[in-house]
Structure formats: C-alpha cells, structure tokens
Image (spheres, rainbow, N blue to C red):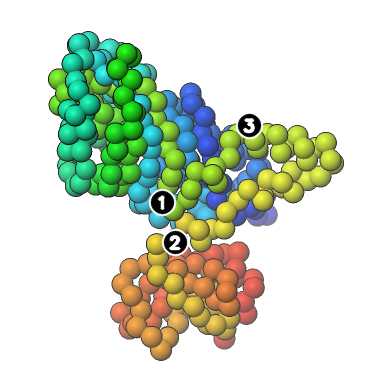
Amino acid sequence: MAKRSKGRAVDGILLLNKPQGISSNKALQQAKGVYFAQKAGHTGALDPLATGMLPICFGEATKFTQFLLDTDKTYIVRAQLGERTTTSDSDGEIVSTKDVNVTREQLTKEIAAFVGESDQYPSMYSALKYQGRPLYKYAREGIEVPRKCRKINVFSLSFDEFDEQNNVLQMTAHVSKGTYIRTIVDDLGENLGCGAHVIMLHRTAVGQYPADKMVSLDEIEALLAKAKEEELAPSTYLDSLLLPIDTALTDLPVVEITKEQGGIFSHGQAVELPIALPDGAIKVVADNIFIGTGERNSNGHLKVKRGLASQQDDYVKPE
C-alpha cells in the first residue's frame, strides 16, 4: 500500500517576513505547519538576528529554489561602531572596544570602497558546511576550519544616516548571492580603526520580489482566525498570499510552445522547435501555462530540465 503524504498538496511561493529571534528553519516549519503543506523549503537563510524577506517554496515550487538562492539580495543594515564581536553581530561577545573618531566624509569614502567585485571569506559563524557540519558549530567549540574564499559583488552600498551620539551607522546594501553583510560591516569597522558589528539586518528584496509583497506570521495567523470565524477553509485566505511558481524565474528567457508540444515536454521527451534555443535554463510556457524549465540538448531540441508533475495530467501522453 502506498504511503500517504502528510499534509495537502499546495504549490506556490510565500514571501515571509521573518521575525527576529528565530532561525530560518523554524520560520519555515511554522509556515509549513500553518499551510499544512506536504512539502516546503526556504531560499537563502537569514540569521536569527535578521528579519525580512524569506521566500518559502511550497510543493512544486521547491524544484526551483536554486534560482532564488542564486539571485541578488537587498538589505537595510545598522552597525554599531566602536565594538567588535566574535560573530560580527550583536549575538556575539564583544572582543574589543575602541573610541570612534570618524567623519561623515571618511564614512562615505570607506563605504564606497566596498562597491564592486571582491573576494570574501565566509564568517565562521555562518551556516555553510565543512565536512557536512555547519561552520557555526565548529566556531562555538572554538575550532577554526578552512573556508573557501568566494567572489562576491556589491552592486551598491549607500550611506543612509549616522547617529553620532550613539555611533550607529545605517546603510542599504544591494549584493550578489552568498554575500555576508556581517563580514562587510566587520571589515568596515577595521578599516575605520574602531571596529563594528551588526545590530539590525532587514532583507527588503530577493531578486525582483518587492518588500510590499511580504507577509508576517502574525498576519497569517490573523487570516487563519478570520477563516475560522467565518467557518471557511483556511486555504480560502492563505492560498491567496501565494505567488505563482514562475515568478521565481523572471530572469530566464521564455520559450512558448503549443499544448501538443507541452504534452511531449511534460512527459519527459525533447521537443523539436523551428527556432534556435539560447544557452542555459529556459522558462517553458505551453498554451500560456508555465510547465517547467528546459534546456537545449545536443541536437538543438528543447529537453526537460525541471518539469511540473502537477501539469502532466493536463496533457495527453504522446504515443
């Protein structure tokens, strides 16, 4: 007898506004529980200290999480100057305290120096893994392990404001995937000669997703209560918060095929098209419906890269 999946089959992307004080995985599990979803995953972890946009992919959307992991991110960050910590944020222990003697002109110059491509070593307090174990677990045991330097790109880093009385600096950062804002702040503090650490980090955008599409766990709970009060299924309100799966693929080239070709594609067979296909992943639309991603095979035909199982029943299996 086939094992029944716990939960319901729900597909789509929720732009969760993660609250402070919980891990991204905890936020994911809460969202998954509220939606009673069979399958869910998040795209790009935020530290417990951090808040803001955490895309939660439900069901078939989990097949495309890599596109959101690979996209750029935007953050608002506040840094405390004059103190350096073990974790480069306020969750760590203070390891040095120095006087802050910086001018706005100096801040502007040093901040601008981070814009562009550079190499960055991940923090030992990151969730990256070494030999299958997160780096932060080694760090908590006082163990330093090798870390690979990674190429990052700071598209912009703006000097927003500086509270001279409390030595608190606020910046807005638009960065490539894998960029650690804590490391930038720590490096900035060292360049200024006073030390610095993150006291607030809020992610406002992931790729093309705007901040006004985010929803908090409290707002979701309020909708649950409303549905219960009106004696409606929770999905009546909750599912309306979900964005279509293909909104994660806005940067991909699009190829439109017929419904008949969609049947061939959805059942795993390559489709011959009268056009030259671009390199890399392609967003595939059949009869105005997103059915997955494809790529060019050695014959120049369109083959399946990631298909939607939920679309297979809508097409007749080719002979």
Q: Quadrant of residue 280?
A: bottom left
Query: At label 3, which amino acid type do we have?
Result: Asp
| Mark 3 Cα shell of 10 Å, populated few (<14), some (14-19), many (≥20) | few
Q: What element carries label 1?
A: loop
| Residue 51 in sight here | yes
**Does the residue at mark 1 contact the one at mark 3 (Cβ under 8 Å)?**
no
Give the Cα distance between marks 1 and 3. 24 Å
| Callout count | 3
Disc assigned to residue 218: 3
**Does the residue at mark 1 contact the one at mark 2 (Cβ under 8 Å)?**
yes
Q: Which residue is drawn at 44% across and 53% down?
A: 208
> Going from the N terminus, do you reach mark 2 or mark 3 first?
3
Quarter of the image for the N terminus: give it.
bottom right
In the picture provided, is 145 more to the left or to the right than 164?
left
Residue 96: image x %, image y %?
21, 12
Q: In which quarter of the image is residue 170?
A: top left
